[in-house]
Amino acid sequence: IYGKRIKNDPTKSFMHGIGNPTADYQDQAKTSRAINLTDWINLAVVVAVFTVIVIGCTFWGWGTNEISAMMISCGIIVSVFSKTDFQSVIKHANKSVTSVAGMIIIIVMANAIGLILTEGMIVSTIIHALSSALSILPDFLIPFGVMTLISILNVIIPSGSAKAVMLMPV
């Protein structure tokens, strides 16, 4: 019923005025252009950079620093071939960095907390306390205690591998 009503009068739709993805893609297709030599060169640069990254990680032991340097180099090379002005490159780079800055701060803080917990032997203390609490339970209640413990730790430690390492001694 709703479909027929909307087909007759699209203005009665709950989604009217919000946007039409199909129309947006059609508008974008109308404004697209043919691939030129610069696009092919940029594609070749990107493929070459990713190939070097794969080789570097596989054979030379590259890590995050080397991969980051290659990606930044790729961006600079592509912007040179595209004849993009410096201000535009900086504006887009700034927008990209600000969009991920919050996530970067969260990751750095999580790593710092993990380092403090590990180096301060706090994790060992927590594991000892947890295993002591489970050891006083009767044998038939230990699985329920472990399940409860894991449920509590799911809130604190979202990483499955970190929980596995932490709970092995328990």
Image (spheres, grey):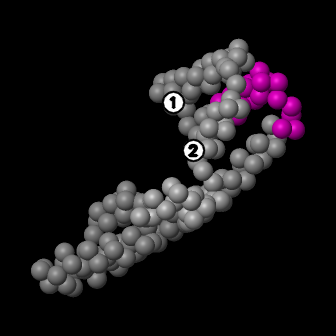
Amino acid at circle 1: Cys
Q: Is residue 46 left or right of residue 122?
A: right
Frontmost residue, 29 versus 167: 29
What crowding class fits label 1: few (fewer than 14 Cα within 10 Å), some (14-19), or many (20 or more)?
Answer: some
Q: State the quadrant of the N terminus.
A: bottom left
Task: Left or right? Give the position of 155 relative to 79.
Answer: left
Q: Position of residue 52 (x, y in %)?
A: 57, 23
Q: Quadrant of residue 110?
A: bottom right
- Where residue 144 appears, as percent x and y from the top left, is 21, 78
Q: Is residue 84 above or below residue 68?
A: above
Q: Which residues are magenta?
A: 70-88
The residue at 71%/14% (across/down) is 37
Residue at numbered disc 2: 22
**16 over 73 or under it: above or below:** below
The three-letter code of the residue at mark 2 reads Thr
Q: Nearer the viewer, residue 83 or 111?
A: 83
Question: Which residue is at the front of the view, 159 or 114?
Answer: 159
Which is more foreground, mark 2 or mark 1? Answer: 2
Tell me which secondary structure the magenta stretch mostly adopts: helix
Answer whether residue 119 is visible to the viewer in this image. Answer: no
Quarter of the image containing the C terminus?
bottom left
First-in-chain label (2 vs 1):
2
Asked if residue 142 is among those painted magenta in the image, a careful observer would answer no
The span from disc 2 to disc 1 (Cα, nearest Å) is 40 Å
In the picture of the structure, the residue carrying the numbered disc 1 is: 57
Circle 2 — which element? Answer: helix
